Amino acid sequence: MLGEACVHFWQGVPQLGENWMYFDINNLDGMYERAKSNGVTITKAPENYPWGMREFNALDLNGYNIRFGQYRGPHS
């Protein structure tokens, strides 16, 4: 079980390396470890950002960017 998630979609013409999908999840570090252990291509390791999010990037099977984020609060 991965828990609750919020999925963001954008309109546009898909282009490898330029488009991405964003998942706002509750257990980012758990998802990162699960993805790594299953051989997912990680393009950016988890990082904390000033806007209160912790995020990492991966590629799906078609080479499209997927970004996962978890809100950690300001100054996290």
Image (cartoon, helix red, strand yellow):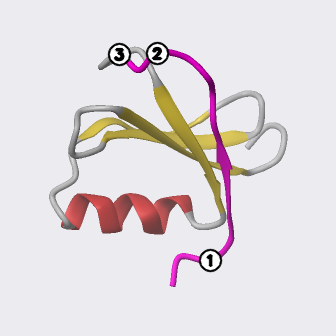
Q: Position of residue 61 (x, y in %)?
A: 21, 46
**Is 3 part of what is drawn in magenta?**
yes
Q: Which residue is at 58% across, 67% downward?
A: 27
- Judged from the image, the secondary structure of the residue bearing numbered disc 2 is loop
Point out the frontmost of discs 2 and 1.
2
Point out the frontmost of discs 1 and 3.
3
**Is 10 part of what is drawn in magenta?**
yes
Q: Which residues are magenta?
A: 1-14
Answer with left or right where residue 71 lies relative to residue 40. right
Point out the frontmost of discs 3 and 2.
2
- Which amino acid lies under the numbered mark 2 shown in the image of this protein? Val
- Which amino acid lies under the numbered mark 3 shown in the image of this protein? Gln
Q: Which residue is at 29% across, 44% downward?
A: 60
Residue at the disc numbered 1: 3
- Judged from the image, the secondary structure of the residue bearing numbered disc 1 is loop
Residue at the disc numbered 3: 15
- Which amino acid lies under the numbered mark 1 shown in the image of this protein? Gly
CB-based contact (under 8 Å), mark 3 and mark 2: yes
> What distance separates the C-alpha of mark 1 from that of mark 3?
30 Å
Q: Residues within 10 Å of mark 1 (few under 14, many from 20)?
A: few
Q: Which residue is at 61% across, 44% downward?
A: 54
Residue at the disc numbered 2: 13
Q: Residues within 10 Å of mark 2 (few under 14, many from 20)?
A: few
